[in-house]
Image: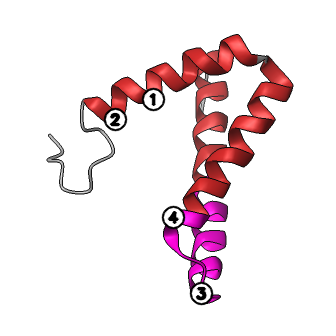
């Protein structure tokens, strides 16, 4: 029998949800590409939809903080396809 603390279980559930969400997004992305939609249009639409929903749920200040954190991650090269994983 597996004995997990509440926070460990919550982390596992969150990780599973992120994995499923990633799979949904990958499928939608592939469908868009196969329908002839350019990657730039898919990306901008995904970002715009996400930011709109986050502002609606959490407000502009919190979203601006998130966007600043994402900006730093981009600057550090976290999203480069050629980055080396250690």
Determine the secondary structure under disc 4. Answer: helix
Residue 74: give its label. 2
Asked if the residue at tag 4 contacts the one at tag 1, i.e. Cβ–Cβ closer than 8 Å, the answer is no
The image quadrant that residue 11 belongs to is top right
The color scheme shown is secondary structure
Determine the secondary structure under disc 2. Answer: helix
Which residue: 45% across, 29% down?
A: 70
Q: Which residue is mark 3?
A: 36
Q: Give the x, y percent position of residue 10.
A: 67, 26
Tell me the CA gap for discs 2 and 1.
Answer: 6 Å
Asked if the residue at tag 1 contacts the one at tag 2, i.e. Cβ–Cβ closer than 8 Å, the answer is yes
Q: Earlier in the sequence, mark 2 or mark 3?
A: 3
Return the residue nearer the eye: 17 or 69.
69
Q: Earlier in the sequence, mark 2 or mark 4?
A: 4
The image quadrant that residue 74 belongs to is top left
Q: Residue furthest top?
A: 61
Determine the secondary structure under disc 3. Answer: loop
- Compared to residue 58, the image places residue 25 above or below, namely below
Q: Is residue 58 left or right of residue 66?
A: right
Q: Quadrant of the N terminus?
A: top right
| Magenta-drawn segment | 21-41
Which residue: 35% across, 29% down?
A: 73
Tell me the CA gap for discs 2 and 3.
Answer: 27 Å
* CA neighbours of label 3 inside 10 A, class few (<14), some (14 to 19), many (20+): few
Asked if the residue at tag 3 contacts the one at tag 1, i.e. Cβ–Cβ closer than 8 Å, the answer is no
Return the residue nearer the eye: 24 or 58.
58
Determine the secondary structure under disc 1. Answer: helix
Residue 86: give its label. none
Residue 70: give its label. 1
């Amino acid at each position: 029998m597996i004995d997990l603390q509440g926070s460990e279980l919550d982390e596992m559930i969150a990780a599973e949800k992120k994995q499923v969400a990633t799979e949904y997004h990958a499928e939608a992305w592939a469908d868009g590409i196969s329908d002839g939609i350019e990657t730039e249009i898919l990306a901008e639409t995904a970002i715009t939809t996400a930011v709109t929903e986050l502002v609606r749920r959490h407000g502009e200040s919190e979203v601006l903080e998130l966007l600043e954190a994402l900006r730093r991650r981009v600057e550090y090269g976290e999203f480069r396809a050629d980055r080396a994983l250690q």
